[in-house]
Amino acid sequence: MAFDGRNYSAPTPVSPYRYHSRAPATSFALSEVLINAYVAARLNERIVFQVCYPYDHRDPAFDGSYPGGIPLRPMTYPSTNYPIRVGEGFRYIPPEATHLRAEVHFACVGSIATVASHTLSARPIGAAGATIMAQAVATPIDVSAAAAMLAATGGRFRGQSAGQLLGAFLSPFGGTNPTRFSATMELELAAQNPGVVNEVWVDCNMAAAGRAGTQYQPLAAVCEWACKG
Amino acid sequence: MSKPSNTSTLSPLALGVGGEILTEDVLDVLGQLNWSFQNRPRVHISHTTGIDGWGGGDEISIMRILVPQLSAPQWAGGLRFRIHVRPEVESIAIGARFFFEPSTLDAGEAYWEIGGATLSSGTQITMSADHADNGDEIVSTVSTAITGTGSLLCLGKFASRSGSGAANFLRSFRVEDHPVATLPDPGTD
Amino acid sequence: MSKIGIPEAATTFGALDAANLGDGDPLDAWSLRTMARSSNLLIGQGEPALNLVWSSENVEALGELYGVPGALAGFGYLHWYVVLPPLTVPKRPGLSSFECAIMMNVIGTDTVEVQIGTNATGGLDPLAGESSPNVIVCTPASAVTSFLDYSIKGIPATRWASHETISIAIRGRFPDPIRVPSIFAPGGGSAQPTTAAIEKMYGPSTHVCSIKQWASVPSWPADLNALGRAIRVVDAPAASGGPPSPFSDLWAPRSLIGMGDGVSSGSSHELVMYPGIDSASQAAAFVGKYFEICEVPRWQICNLALWTEDRF
């Protein structure tokens, strides 16, 4: 039976007015209770998985010329061993769920314009083999303009406003600095996914043409289930 | 009679002000309310923790949750975190996915401490896994009668007991509530 | 007893038996109240929004600067420094505040502040401080090498949103008493000065500025900025071989964020600082005053958890 509550997203606290003696509108109170039950079923406890890669923030210089830098580990060099997983988890997907959503943050720097493609996938754990559902999002990585941004001598930070915070995940400088991106994905589930435990994961695939000279580093990934009307 | 727990297709607009209230509708509302409580168990934490190459490709290490080879009963620390458990929760489930080196037939153990379920009291939650479990999730449960509820400190420790692989690791884990089996009675507050 | 106009929520969910609502029976106020209280609890109880873990192996105890996979660690630089990417997390609509709990190891008894930015706070605020509702002040009561719990409640959240974007920044407080490190030339060379008269301020701006020494050229290691250092400017030199200068600071200490032009391979004689000078006149006024290279706090986090708080 179709889940009728998927259109309700605003909770309605039930006031004691509804049930005090001589209070009117008892049926209205019931409607509020029902709305809240629907809202709770639709919006409560949606986390599927969350991961944040660790970083050694002991060197704030992020112009790439000095040791340390943003990622704890050097950005991975491309290879033919793609796709690489960014995050994963196991989760019971409620029967009422219609979608999975994921947000990925990553850093990428390269010598030519390329594309980083992230895919959100879900597979019931009893279904070995092929993924049941997957949704890919492509993020174009245009490095041609960024390469000219940083002064050749290094050690200078241009374009910072007085109030801007420095840090690993701020707006980037170009050149040898990795550029930060984010990608969001929304996967419409198949009939097999809801109602059972699924393996859910996000992976990254770099376009073959851009792999040479491109470095990629995942930063974080979060995933949740959603019930859309 | 019992406590209803059902999904409903009743529209709240049908319960208009001044309208009649049918018993069936009230029971339907009660059923949906109870169902929504019972069927949204909490995921406290669900995190990936693998080391280099954890997905079989060129993955980057997330965490050095190695399962080092140690002679029993030694353990290596790895995880320390906090969760909030509602008072209605009856049991908590821990799921973990390991990687044990198949070529050397590696196997290992993990123990988890959740709140009052501790190693020192002998109520820790233990898991065993080996290379044949690679790809699967190992699940263990513990009653909140042991862990308690509220703000709970959690620990995860690991050890490899057999085999010689140096790259055994915890790939991902999660801690979540089991759906409440028995709907609780109303309190007196 | 309820107060008219104020929604009640049960402490724990209470499920009515169907017998309470029998065919032909009236719908009594108690039954409706019980359903309302449980319904309010269902929409009003807080839930996890974010729960992240990193290695709880103590980086300090391991004595390693880099290469400890899994550790979220850093220096408490003296300006707000973003340490996590902005993550969008699910949130129950109707809830308007977060509670944050952090397990952090702060070395010694230094102080490190953590700022949690949300949509409701307008993200991260470079001017946020101890009195801000979204700043946790982390100071160990005693110098222990372990992870301690720090938490804060009442972080503003966007009430009617079903998601919130969370950003985390960290700032250290200048240690008191200050600590002056030993600095050696690259390759295990001779001891290098941690203080001297300032010869010239370079590239002065409010963004960044630098001090460059030419007369007695130091050989500071080119990665000195990666060791958690800050620069004070004081009005008199510290006694040679003695304790750090007790004399007046002429400006708020700055974080050392880069080493400028090298003189010879692997060494540098320029200290790059953030933020820059406060006014143009400082560039000239500081010539002849004294810089001191000092240490900043060190921290490591093994767990960061965020929950929405109960509404009722």
Image: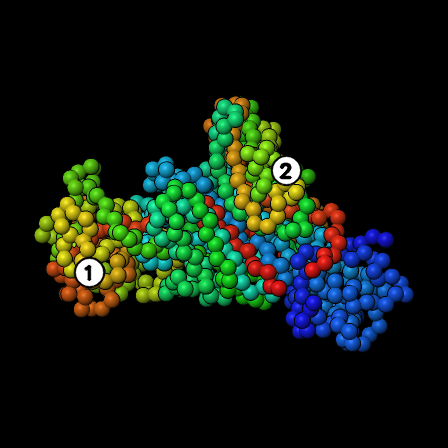
Residue C81 to residue B96: above or below: below
Residue B81: percent from left, percent from top: 51, 45
Indicate the quadrant containing the C terminus of chain B: top left, top right, bottom left or bottom right: bottom right
Is label 2 in contact with label 1 (beta carbons under 8 Å)? no
Which residue was labeled with disc 2?
Answer: B139
Mark 1: few/some/many CA within 10 Å (<14, 14-19, 20+): few
Q: Is residue B30 visible?
A: yes
Instruction: Look at the numbered disc 1 and give the secondary structure of its residue.
Output: loop
Which residue was labeled with disc 1?
Answer: C248
Q: Do marks 2 and 1 share a subunit? A: no
Left or right for C142, reference A189 = left
How many callouts does the rendering have? 2
Question: At x 50% / y 64%, what residue is drawn?
Answer: C156
Q: Quadrant of residue B61?
A: top left
Q: Identify residue type, mark 2.
A: Val
Q: Nearer the viewer, mark 2 or mark 1?
A: 1
Left or right for B171, reference C77 = right
Task: Give the spatial CA distance, label 2 vs label 1.
Answer: 61 Å
Q: Identify residue type, mark 1.
A: Ser
Task: Identify which residue, B73 or B36, lies in the foreground.
Answer: B73
Question: At x 19% / y 66%, what residue is drawn?
Answer: C282
Q: Quadrant of residue B106?
A: top right
Instruction: Look at the numbered disc 2 and give the secondary structure of its residue.
Output: strand
Task: Identify which residue, C24 or C51, lies in the foreground.
Answer: C24
Task: Identify which residue, C198 or B53, lies in the foreground.
Answer: C198
Residue B47: percent from left, percent from top: 54, 45
Question: At x 40% / y 39%, what residue is drawn?
Answer: C58
Q: What is the chain identity of the residue bearing mark 2? A: B
Q: Is residue B13 visible?
A: no
Q: Residue furthest left?
A: C215
Residue A54: percent from left, percent from top: 43, 45
Q: What is the chain identity of the residue bearing mark 1? A: C
